[in-house]
Image (tube, coloured by chain):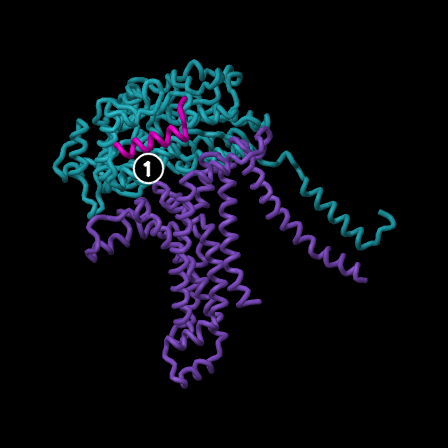
Chain colours: A cyan, B purple
Amino acid sequence: MTGIPMKRRTLLSGALAAAALAAGPAAAQTVELEFPTWQAEEPGPADFWNEAVKAFEASHPGVKINKYQIPFKDYIDRTTVRFASKRPPDIVQLPTRNFAAFAQQGWLMPLDELMAGTDIKQAYIPLQQEMVWEGKTQGVLLMAYGMVFFYNEKMLADASVSVPKTPDDLLKAIKATTNSAAGTFGWGATTSEHPNIFVDWSAWATGLGASLFTKAGQYNLTDPKTVAAIDSFRQAVKSAPKGTSTETARQLFVDGKIAMMRDGPWVAALIAKAPDAVRPHLKVGTMPFPVVAGGTSNSIHIPVGLDPARQKLVWEFITMISRPDWQARYFKLVKAPSPRKDVASDAEVAKDPMLSLAMNAAGKAENLFPTAAAAQLGYAQIAKLVGEAGIRLVNTETPTETVLKALQDELSRRVPIK
Amino acid sequence: MQQQERRFAFALLLPALVTTGLLIVYPMYLVISLSLREGKSMNFLDSTGQVFGLQHYADVLSDPGTWTSVVTTLVYTAGSMLPSFLMGLALALLLNTTFPGRRLFRGLILLPWAVPGVLVSVLFLWLLDASYGVVNAMLRQAGLISTDIAWFTDERTALAAVIAPTIWKSFPFFTLTILAALQAVPGELYEAARMDGAGRWQRFRYVTWPGVRGAAVLALVLNTLWAFREFDIIFATTGGGPYRATETLGIRAYQEAFSYFEIGRACVLGIVMLAIALVVVLAARRPLQKEFF
């Protein structure tokens, strides 16, 4: 550095030293895997994920999993935008109903080669096949379930009604336990625009032996049986608190403000956190419908284009949680059947009434989600349009048949099923 | 020498020109370009293979939903700006008088404006909650309603329900702007008017209003443009529902882009918004020129 004035030499040296320090020991950098999920704050699933993340980080020094909450209502839109702008998260969890749309875009990494080194294909239930798209396995199933019935036996007793055993009993009990002036409601359901309105409708219709789709996979909303089923659902939902999301409805049930609701078995974990005065009265049973509705819930995936080192870590995380010990933990914490066949013995299941009920419901469940490829691909848009129509049923007196006809027309226009 | 001065002036302007180019001109170019690319692509960053054409314009402009959104936007903008303006004017007149605690009130008035839109939405979601909100409780107690009103989820009340928090958030700006202009009105004018026998209304009409008119018009134009493109309050409360009752053009553009992945259609809606905003600005040009230039 000869010929350069002294002050400038000092400055240059300082800048070089600072740059060298900043470049520093690259090996000490932490690898952070991004893991957005709608379950980060849901008792049961959140407990499982917290344990899994902690264990994985402990066994992989220098690796951190950044797990964070995205509300379910916004989850698919936000995740789709991430993928569409080529910035997917590292660990991808998806509601299985939306899997087809992501797989179709070529956004998910085929896992057959990686799975060859594990026992997942042999040890998992046949529903794992739903993770196959165009001949390639593109995800690992996390949960399959049947709907169960949650009720507050004290609220039923106070209204002098017994636990309903038939759909008619249920409607009578809902009416009897509703006192909106006192802030108590007979039924808990989603009554604000939310993609889960599709689940509410379909679970109720499927439970009564009707269906929102024909066997050929076409829209079936104007079928008289479907209209009658949705009309019956409308009677129930008129007695639900208005403007609530699925999460709010669950919280109100746990707070003793809602007498009955239908939901997945994982809500039992939320009951454990109910106030002391309410918890003893909250019970779980079988839905009083001829058919148990259910389906696959969610799955875990690796996005295409992830760098090999991160891809390896994500697969190691997935392999870890797929092991029998972790799946047994999943079963215990989430109270939902594990997709592994060998997780719990009959004796262990029989010891826990909730696990027994969940297994029984999952075993009998009829799929409430569409099976035709075109409907699966357009599921997000279908759920959105059903959500809009659902609000009309709750807040207006427009005849059910009129609402369903308008919805079917709009669905046929915006999401045609060919 | 003149040449050197010009070059120097240009050099000083260059950072601003580059920033404007990057933040305004380039995004505008992208919006126009994407609006002219026919077809649908899930890849926001790559539109190769999509031919140029006017199909998106035909689809959007012939969709009755677009015009419903235009009407909703105009009703929302007018419905929130007029009450905000009147409230702001009334409060400014009040705060221009002397009363105990005036300084404290002047500070408190600014609070709604400082609160982020999303927090305002959360506040009003609770106030107007159908089952547990304090507004319904008060209306029931007063015997004005017998069943709870689902303010944000009933098509008949949702637009009014999103206008309410917008008014609450907007009026402080009017208050502040008009109050500042009021302070500049000489007190002698009021004295002279009183001595000439002018009543309260006449003093307002011939002394106060001419003094604050410029600031009021400017505040109205700015707030109207902000309300026109309002997004966070509506998105956080209703998301454009129920059944599109609160789907303004901004919300509709968002839904087209991020729920239906119709980027071309979303861009066309953006251009429609720009066209309407331009009409407002051109309409306001004369009154603003009269007051300020």
Under tag 1, what secondary structure?
Answer: helix
In the rendered structure, the answer to whether residue A414 lies left or right of residue A182 reads: right
Q: Is residue A314 visible?
A: no
Whether the magenta-drawn stretch holds residue B223 is answered as no
Give above or below for A30 relative to B77. Answer: above
Query: Where, by quadrant of the figure, is residue A141 drawn?
Result: top left
**Residue A270 pos. (x, y %):** 32, 36
**Residue A341 pos. (x, y %):** 37, 17
Q: Which residue is mark 1?
A: A246
Question: Which residue is pictured at 56% across the width and 34% down the height?
Answer: B53
Give above or below for B91 relative to A369. Answer: below
Q: Amino acid at mark 1?
A: Thr
In the rendered structure, the answer to whether residue B50 lies left or right of residue A372 reads: right
Q: Quadrant of the C terminus of chain A?
A: top left
Front residue of this view, candidates B104 and B20 = B20
- Residue at the far top in the pictured view: A122
Question: Which residue is pictured at 43% across the width and 35% down the height?
Answer: A75
**Residue A142 pos. (x, y %):** 41, 25
> Which chain does the numbered disc 1 sit on?
A
* Number of on-image labels: 1
Q: Which residues are magenta?
A: A401-418
Whether the magenta-drawn stretch holds residue A411 is answered as yes
Give above or below for B169 relative to A303. Answer: below
Label 1 packing within 10 angstroms: few (<14), some (14-19), many (20+) = many
Q: Is residue A216 visible?
A: yes
- Residue at the far left in the pictured view: A160
Front residue of this view, candidates B48 and A78 = B48
**Residue B82 pos. (x, y %):** 40, 60
Q: Main secondary structure of the magenta part?
A: helix
Query: Where, by quadrant of the figure, is residue A268 drawn?
Result: top left
Query: Where, by quadrant of the figure, is residue B38 drawn?
Result: top right
- Residue at the far right in the pictured view: A3
